[in-house]
Each structure stands twice: as C-alpha cells, then as structure tokens.
Image: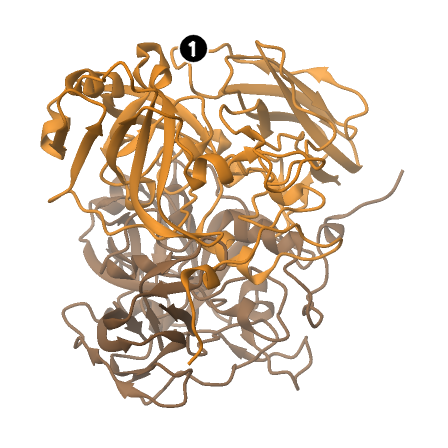
Chain colours: A brown, B orange
Amino acid sequence: MEQVSVQDASAPARTAAAGEGISREELALAARNHGLPLEALRYEVTPPGLHYVLVHYDIPAAGSDGWRLAVRGLVRTPLSLDLAALRALPSVTHRVTMECAGNGRALLSPRPVSQPWLTGAVGTADWTGVPLHLVLAEAGVRPEAVEAVFTGADHGVERGVEQDYRRSLPVGAATGEGSGVLLAHTMNGQPLPPQHGHPLRLVVPGWYGMAHVKWLREITLVDAPFTGFQQSVAYRYRRADEAPDSPGEPVTRIEPRALMAPPGFPDFMSRTRVVHPGPVRLHGRAWSGYGPVVRVEFSGDGGRTWTEAAVEPRGPHPWAWQAWTCAWEAVPGRHTLSVRATDGEGRTQPLEQPWNRGGFGNNLVQRVPVLCC
Amino acid sequence: MEQVSVQDASAPARTAAAGEGISREELALAARNHGLPLEALRYEVTPPGLHYVLVHYDIPAAGSDGWRLAVRGLVRTPLSLDLAALRALPSVTHRVTMECAGNGRALLSPRPVSQPWLTGAVGTADWTGVPLHLVLAEAGVRPEAVEAVFTGADHGVERGVEQDYRRSLPVGAATGEGSGVLLAHTMNGQPLPPQHGHPLRLVVPGWYGMAHVKWLREITLVDAPFTGFQQSVAYRYRRADEAPDSPGEPVTRIEPRALMAPPGFPDFMSRTRVVHPGPVRLHGRAWSGYGPVVRVEFSGDGGRTWTEAAVEPRGPHPWAWQAWTCAWEAVPGRHTLSVRATDGEGRTQPLEQPWNRGGFGNNLVQRVPVLCC
C-alpha cells in the first residue's frame, strides 16, 4: 500500500504560465468563496450575504452552546469565557470596511495561483463586540508579553503544514484603546453568520482580512514574535527579486482603493457594460487602512487624463469606506472608466501592477469597459 | 468613430478547448455568484449567505417602497399590488431545495463556457408568501390563457438580446394548488435579501432555479407559449448531435442528486481531504424534483462497488432535501468517495456525464478524493 502523509495533500506555491486559464483548484476556491457584486457598492452597509467571504479551510460547526474563549499564556489571571460572559461586558459598535489581502490577485501577470480574486473582495459591516483591551485588562497582561496570538476553530493543511488558523498582533496594537480592536459577537445587529466566524471573531479595523480571526477560541500572550504559518510563511510581501522563502515584509493595513459601481447594464457572460448616450452619474466607494481618503480621481479614457470626483468626507465611522460621485457624459463608442483613490498619507493607487509572489495588496486602478450606444 | 451596438457586448456560445482553463469571463461570474460550501450540508435549512446565488445581470436597486406587482394580460381584473396588499393575503411557508440548472457544468468535458459551477449550486430555505393561485383567482384568468409570463426587474444583454429576465409557466402549473408555487416575500423568516429577489420572487418547488423569477414585478397571462430568450434559447437540453439552434427540450424539474459533506479537513489550495484511520460517519443530503429520494448508495472505491446508505424518509417538507448517513472505515491510502441518489420514479444519477450544449442538469455522481493517514 502507498504510504501517504498530510504533506501529500498540498502542492508547492506557483505562478500560472503565460496564457494559462484558471485551474480547477482555483475554481474550487472561487466557487465556495465570493466577492461583493460591484452594484452592491450602492449600500453603505453591505447586506448579509453580499459581504465578501474567504474561508481557508472548512466553516467549523461552532455553535454558541459549549463554546468558550480561553485567554492564557503571559497573563496574571487566565480566563475561560462563555458567550454570556462576553455579552455581559461593555460592548461597542464599529462600522468597518474589510478587504481580503488577495483582492486583485487574479489580475496580476503572472498570476500567483491561489484564491483568484478580481476586485470585489471587500465589504462593510457594523460589528458589535467587546473591546479587546477590556478583556486583556481583566486577564492582566504580564510586562514580558510582546504579542497576542489568536486561534480560530478552523483546521486544515496549507503547503504541507497541518494547522489551526492562527495570527498574532503586537501587544500595543491589541491593547490600544484607539485601535478599535473588537471581539465581535454581532454583525449588523444579528449573531454572526457561520461564514463570518460564529460565534466570535476578532475585528482589527484598517487591517486586511487575514487579521480578523474567525471562530475565535483562544488568545495566548507570548514573549516572542509569533512565527506560525499565517504570519511568517503566508501573508508576506515578497518581491520578484526575493526568494520564495525569503522573510519578505508582513501584510498589515489596507492599501487605498476606489471602486466604481459599473454603470448601465451588463452582458451576462462578458460582463461588458452597456450605457445609453447622455449624462451618467457614476458612483462608488473608496477606502484606505491608513486614514481618510482625501481624493478620488476619474478617468474616462483608460487612464490618460484624470479629473476630480466628489468624495464624501470621512464621517462618524473612521474605519468605513467613503462614497464618491462623478458626472460623466457618455458618447457613442467604447470606453474604459477608471477611478483612483489617494489617502491622507499620500498613498495612491498605482497605474502599474504592484506585483509580489503571494499576490497581496494589488490595488491597481479598476478598469471598467463600457460600450455606449 | 466606431459604430457599436448592444450586440457587440455579447460573444457567441462556445465550449472550451481541450485543456483550456477557466477564462476571465467565467471567473468574473464565479467571483460574484457562489455555491454552497459543502460542509454547510450539515444544516437542514441553509443559513443566510450560504445558499447558492446566481444573478444573470445586476442585482437591481429594488426597494420595498414604491414597488408594485402588476397582474395583466388575459385576466378579468388587472391588478397592481403593493407589498402591504400582498402581505395582507393568506400566506404559507414551504421548505424548498433549490438548485441551479447549471450545477456541475464546469465538470463537463468539453466544458460549455458559462457560469462555471462545480457541485455546490444548491441550498434550502423556508420561503413564505402568497400561493400564486390565490392572486390569479383574484385577477380571474380568462379561459383562453395558456401560460403566465413572469418578469423580473433585472435587465441586461445575453447573446446579443437586450431583455428583462422573463420566464413562463403553463397555466396549470401556475394555478394548481398542489404545485406549491408561491409569491415569496420572506426567506427564513426575514425579508428577502437583495440577491434572492427583494422584495418578491416566484418560488416553483421542484424546478431548477431559472424558474424562480427574482425581483418579480409583472405577471402576464398570454394565449400562446412564451418564446422569450430564457425560455426558448437558454435553458434547453440540446444533445451533441443537435444543432446549437435546434429547439431542444425544455429544462424543468430538478434531476436527482446526493452530495456528501466532505469528511476530515481540507488542504487550502487543492481542497484534498485528509482523514485519520478509523470509523468515519459520512453524511449529506439528497433530493429530486420528481418526488422523494428512495435510495442513496455509497462507494468508497471510485464507483466500482456500492453499498446502501441510510436515508431519512421524506418528512413534512415534500420539496426539501433528505439527510443520509453512512459508516465508512478509513484505512491508510488514497480513496475516492461517491454517493448516488435514486428517486421514487426510478431516476438515478449517472456514472457517465450527461453532456448537453448548455451544460444543464449534470447530476453525474460526486467524487471526493480523500487521503487517509
């Protein structure tokens, strides 16, 4: 009999060959996970089921009954909290725009083979829960702790490594009151749906989705930076001139991006948009994990010339996307529409792809082909 | 200036070349629409956001305010009902398993190029609404009417034809009390989410999803069979030896299928399952649009030998899937697990692909590769 091991479940990381279509394994991920249909940019808060979902392994069968959150490691008082205990603590609600670090990956050339996102891996929700600093204060973080490690109930294999999904945050980020980090038990006023981490997930405003650990079951305070798979192997920026096993740079906050709700109506298969001649009110949303978006520019000629769109100022929700609108006069012919966001730190979307081996943070400007007739 | 027309938005129907990966246009559909993650077969009623979704064009901005359903054509009293008027009528709740007619399309060889479903385009919900026959009785269907045509608010282009999404039912099916056909305003006790047809959709128990017209805004009684695009061009079974423009046979009721919640845990990228040696309790669901499932068989050797699984008898929900379970002894090595459903009419899942040009009704038995170690 053939000897098999867990390692045999995984293939090495690779990029697709020139002209290679999406593989069966990428399709299996695309068919289970899903992005925001871009017309849903019309909603300030994304309705249930339209928010993007990425699940690494299986959605665990994690019910509310019997579920507990352990807080352990370098704390004075280890805790084991059930959902009732967590709900009894003071809670706050944050409106948070969340985006997958791999958003835009399938538009890269060459294409890193993984979840093949186009541009829709984003969504905004009202998350209600207990500020993390309150729970950590109750446990009493010891001074020698440098990071908090968050463990989810999802279990699987990745690149030959069997693991529970696990990510860390520096103690400063985890305990800072201004960070907005939440242990969220409620999404848009309802218990979390299974695919969003029922019964509890970490929410880390401004960070890409990999930080928002779902099905959260344990927080462990440790005295050295965490080196688990999702921290030091996956979710690293590694340039083309760096080796696949180089340390790279960590993926953290969300790069700025603007998206347009495509105007007119689509062809079913090509998704090409059709608009009739005349004035068109374009609209969409823009966001950055580094602070407010201060400028959105529009191009109706494929990026050759740009004009300023009107951006809603950041309101009472510092971690939520901002609406923008722009007038466009549609004339018969073929057009390519683009928008580009710039944040208060001067970060702006690139016009050339920001390629890296994992396909992370690709905020290349959106291109929307439109046929006006 | 180039003269363009709506026809230029569409490409002709085609099948993929041998070895051709999923195209960018198929990926655009796969990224917006989504299937049921198969571990969610654990739920008798699919939680919100996990039920499969297929949207042909855009999700329309159809709110409850100002929305009306028109009932017109060959009726004695044309109606224009707002949502309050519909909610004031007697309502019933049906638990219905709904499946996309294209489920399994991307497993066909050659692959018809369209929404590239694997096996997960299914889900079960409790739909509450007004029996269609009550509304038609109020309008008074004239004897010369032969079909009811249902029009949704979604608008787009398909194969060069600009259209509102529109499908018909024979008057008998539409008015039969036993058909269970509903004008549903409530899904799992909540208003319909936007992607499931808010504020109103047709539900036709036992039929593939294309019949369940979403964002329903008009019912028109007509004296001749409807020949619109979604009735006579799309959603037809056309064998390989029939011409692409042959009439073919209409796609109607759901062919039998059993699916397994894949055991063990997955590799992120390959989705290969890993199980440890020992007894495994396999489970899943089975359904048919032609009546109860009477037999589910299991194969642990890629379909060479089959044993009977235990199928839950059809209970109080005649249009919902039935649970099945089966014991399997996992021994080290590689395995391919399959299940096969047979309904009360003797329809059974094929072991060879039932190929047709549109890729409809592919209920080839599921194959789940498992690595035991």
Closest to the observer: B166 or B202? B166
Closest to the observer: B309 or B358? B358
Q: Residue furthest right?
A: A1
Determine if residue A99 is in view: no
| Amino acid found under the numbered disc labelled 1 | Gly
Give above or below for A32 relative to B348: below
- Residue B195: quadrant of the picture: top left
Residue B236 location in percent, x, y? 54, 34
Q: Residue at x 37, y 85 (%)?
A: A348
Q: Residue at x 48, y 21 (%)?
A: B321
Q: Residue at x 19, y 57 (%)?
A: A92
Q: How many marks?
A: 1
Secondary structure under badge 1? loop
Closest to the observer: B248 or A234? B248
User: Which image quarter holds the N terminus of chain A?
Assistant: top right
Determine if residue A361 is in view: yes
Residue A325 in the figure: left or right of residue B352: left
- Residue B87: quadrant of the picture: top left
Circle 1 sits on which residue? B315
User: Which image quarter holds the C terminus of chain A?
Assistant: bottom left
Residue B170 in the figure: left or right of residue A102: left
Residue A233 location in percent, x, y? 60, 69
Give above or below for B221 relative to A320: above
Residue A127 location in percent, x, y? 26, 55
Give above or below for A203 relative to B256: below
Residue B106 location in percent, x, y? 62, 45
